[in-house]
Image (spheres, rainbow, N blue to C red):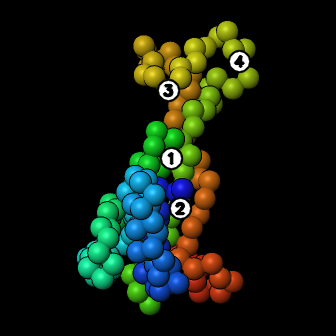
Amino acid sequence: MGTPTWLITHTHLDHIAALPVYVARRRMMRMEPPTLYLPAEAVEDVRRLLLIMQRLDRGRMICQLNGIKAGDEIELSRELIITPFATTHTIPSLGYVVWDRRLKLKEEYHGLPARRYAICGWAAPRSRARCARRWSPTPVILALRDWTTSPRCMTPKS
Ligand SMILES: [Zn+2]
C-alpha cells in the first residue's frame, strides 16, 4: 500500500486482480495517486477496468497509467532508471531492469591519490574536465513477467 509506483509486467489476473482495490484504498487513505507502468497495449483496457470499478463502487479510481514499450527509459528518480524489455508470453508483456545510477571514479583515476583529482557530486561540476567521476548505471533488479522456474518464462525476447 505504501509503494506509490508499480511496474506491471502483464495483465494476467494474478498480476492485476487487486489493482482496483489498491488504487481505491490509496485514495481512501488520502495517499498520493499511484503511478503505474504497464505494456502500452494494455493501458486502455486497464483504464476501462478501473472505470467500471469506479462506476460499481462509486469511488474515484485516480492513478497515473503509463503505457510503455521495450526500449523506453523511465527515470523514476535521480538515482533510479527503469528499462523495459520484451518478453514472450501469451499476452503483451514486458520485463524490467531497474538501474541504480551511481557516480563512479573514472578508470584513468584508479590508483591515483585523491588529492590528484576533483570529485564532483550530484550537482553539475564547475568544469567537466576536472570531474573524476562519471555516471555509471548499475543493474539492481531484474523483473520478468512471472516468477517461475520454467525456462520458457525466464527468457527475454531478443
Ligand atoms: Zn502470466
Structural crowding at the residue carrying mark 3, measured as other residues with C-alpha within 10 Å and reported as few (<14), some (14–19) or many (≥20): few
CA gap, disc 2 and disc 1: 20 Å
Foreground tag (4 vs 1)? 1
Count numbered badges in the picture.
4
- Residue at position x 58%, y 83% from top? 153
Residue plotted at (64% across, 23% down): 109
Out of 27 and 148, give the one closest to the viewer: 27
At label 1, the amino acid type is Leu
Q: Residue at x 46, y 39 (%)?
A: 78
Pointer 4 or 3: first along the chain: 4
Could you say which disc has been placed on residue 112 in the image?
A: 4
Classed neighbour count for the residue bearing mark 2: other residues with Cα under 10 Å, few (<14), some (14–19), many (≥20): few
Q: Position of residue 63 (x, y in %)?
A: 34, 62
Looking at the rendering, which quadrant does residue 112 occupy? Answer: top right
User: What residue is shown with label 1?
Assistant: 80
Pointer 2 residue: 1
Determine contact: label 2, label 4, CB under 8 Å.
Answer: no
Name the residue located 45 percent from the left edge and 22 percent from the top edge.
123
> Which amino acid type is marked by label 4?
Leu
Name the element at disc 4.
Answer: loop
